[in-house]
Image: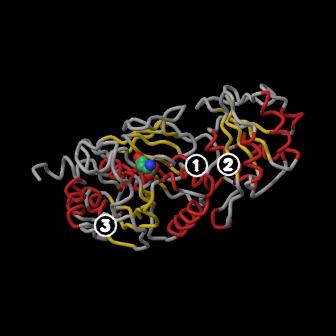
């Protein structure tokens, strides 16, 4: 291959794996040590690496990279396949090995927990991931955790971890929009940046972070906004900071309680209640509400139009669901903005609640967590406004 590893670090590895028939979808449960990642804390290259670590760092951080799949573990048939490819096929140890620059900034260990597209996350996988990350964070020799993840649902996983992990240590969720085999692959730099952010003492106490495309976002706010562009992740109030040429630069802080300041502890949650999302659209089928109730939903997040508006033909089914004990959470399908209580609907009268500015998929996470603590509507409303 004519290209240098500096320009396209993942490509030779992925090509090699394709030739060797090693790109399988099988899940792994192994821990591997990245090559050239010595435990020594004063390696000469660390001292001379150009601004690769925060100046205040006196030793390389120990970072565990937990692999879950996604495009960052993807491979395409050709270099022009930037958007059509197979995700979740390259093992995390191979991804790490394909970015040798990482070993200059941290001692890294890879661990494969899943090998899936993130659209296949469910409550069980979320809990398994959270509990494993929690275990790792308790280890005194682990300074931070990076999770490689598909971009489709990175925002749900990051919000969940942001609300349930009981540690100040940095946790960074990272993905990529292009597989390592593509021209302009973004995974190598994103992973390098994620390790850098997880290694930075400045990242402590900032909750679960999402790093992609040179930006650091809080897991609470970030959302995927475009199907294929590398510039897809946005937070309505902007990212917390940038990663530029090996430097972690913060400009703002998360405003809402997270990690150690929340009422949830991942170690104490063994299942999450079923929460359904019903999406509003013209001529929506009122039967979708009943279907959610029949399928065991304990709450329905109604992704209403505009400010959580509810079509006249959907009001009765939602009231009927509430009468059966199902919580009704009014949200918006617009993509941003707060939903006003007693605005578009008389929430007091119907005993419904509203989100603050959480998108429906984030409201689902928060509502499920809230229901592990309370089924009182007033308490649920307080929680939705708090986090
Ligand atoms: N749908 C896949 C996933 O979310 C690939 C998308 C991506 O990672 O960018 O894992």
The kind of secondary structure element at disc 2 is helix
Mark 1 in CB contact with mark 2 (< 8 angstroms)? yes
State which tag comes first along the sequence, 1 or 3. Answer: 3
Asked whether the viewer can see residue 202, the reply is: no
Q: Is 80 displayed left or right of 57 in the figure?
A: left
Q: Residues within 10 Å of mark 2 (few under 14, many from 20)?
A: many
State which tag comes first along the sequence, 2 or 3. Answer: 3
In this orientation, which residue lies closer to the viewer: 149 or 277? 277
Q: Quadrant of the C terminus?
A: top right
Mark 2, residue position: 366
Query: Could you say where residue 199 lies in the image, as x and y percent from the top left?
Result: 40, 56
Gap in angstroms between the C-alphas marked 1 and 3 = 33 Å
In this orientation, which residue lies closer to the viewer: 27 or 267? 27
Mark 1, residue position: 159
Answer above or below: position of 367 versus 342: below
The kind of secondary structure element at disc 3 is loop
The part of the image, by quadrant, that contains residue 35 is bottom left
Q: Is 12 displayed left or right of 381 in the figure?
A: left
In this orientation, which residue lies closer to the viewer: 280 or 349? 280
Gap in angstroms between the C-alphas marked 1 and 2 = 8 Å
State which tag comes first along the sequence, 1 or 2. Answer: 1
Asked whether the viewer can see residue 358, the reply is: yes
Q: Nearer the viewer, mark 2 or mark 3?
A: 2
Q: Which mark is drawn over residue 41?
A: 3
Q: Residues within 10 Å of mark 3 (few under 14, many from 20)?
A: some
Note whether ligand 1 is within 8 Å of mark 3: no
Q: Nearer the viewer, mark 1 or mark 3?
A: 1
Q: Is 180 displayed left or right of 232 in the figure?
A: left
């Amino acid at each position: 291959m004519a290209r240098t590893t500096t320009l396209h670090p993942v490509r030779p590895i992925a090509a090699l794996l394709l030739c060797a028939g090693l790109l399988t979808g099988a899940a792994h449960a192994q821990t591997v040590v990245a090559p050239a990642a010595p435990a020594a804390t004063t390696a000469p290259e660390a001292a001379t690496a150009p601004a690769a670590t925060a100046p205040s760092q006196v030793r390389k951080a120990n970072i565990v990279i937990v692999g879950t799949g996604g495009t960052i573990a993807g491979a395409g048939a050709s270099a022009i396949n930037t958007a059509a490819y197979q995700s979740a096929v390259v093992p995390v140890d191979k991804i790490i090995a394909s970015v040798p620059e990482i070993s200059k900034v941290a001692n890294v260990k890879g661990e494969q927990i899943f090998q899936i597209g993130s659209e296949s996350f469910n409550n069980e996988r979320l809990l398994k991931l959270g509990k494993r990350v929690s275990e790792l964070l308790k280890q005194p020799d682990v300074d931070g955790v990076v999770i490689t993840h598909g971009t489709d649902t990175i925002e749900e996983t990051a919000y969940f971890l942001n609300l349930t992990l009981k540690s100040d240590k940095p946790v960074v969720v990272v993905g990529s929009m292009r597989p390592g085999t593509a021209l302009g692959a973004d995974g190598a730099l994103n992973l390098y940046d994620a390790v850098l952010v997880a290694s930075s003492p400045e990242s402590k106490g900032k909750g679960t972070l999402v790093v992609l495309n040179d930006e650091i976002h809080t897991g609470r706010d970030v959302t995927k906004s475009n199907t294929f562009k590398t510039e897809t992740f946005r937070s309505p109030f902007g990212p917390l900071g940038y990663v530029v040429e090996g430097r972690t630069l913060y400009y703002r802080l998360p405003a809402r309680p997270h990690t150690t300041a929340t009422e949830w502890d991942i170690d104490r949650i063994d299942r999450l209640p079923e929460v359904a999302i019903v999406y509003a659209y013209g001529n929506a089928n009122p039967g979708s509400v009943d279907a959610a109730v029949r399928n065991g939903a304990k709450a329905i997040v109604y992704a209403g139009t505009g400010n959580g508006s509810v079509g006249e033909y959907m009001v009765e089914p939602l009231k009927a669901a509430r009468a059966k004990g199902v919580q009704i959470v009014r949200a918006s399908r617009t993509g941003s903005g707060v939903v006003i209580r007693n605005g578009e609907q008389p929430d007091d009268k119907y005993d419904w609640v509203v989100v603050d500015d959480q998108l429906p998929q984030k409201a689902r996470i928060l509502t499920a967590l809230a229901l592990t603590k309370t089924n009182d509507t007033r308490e649920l409303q307080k929680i939705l406004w708090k986090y």
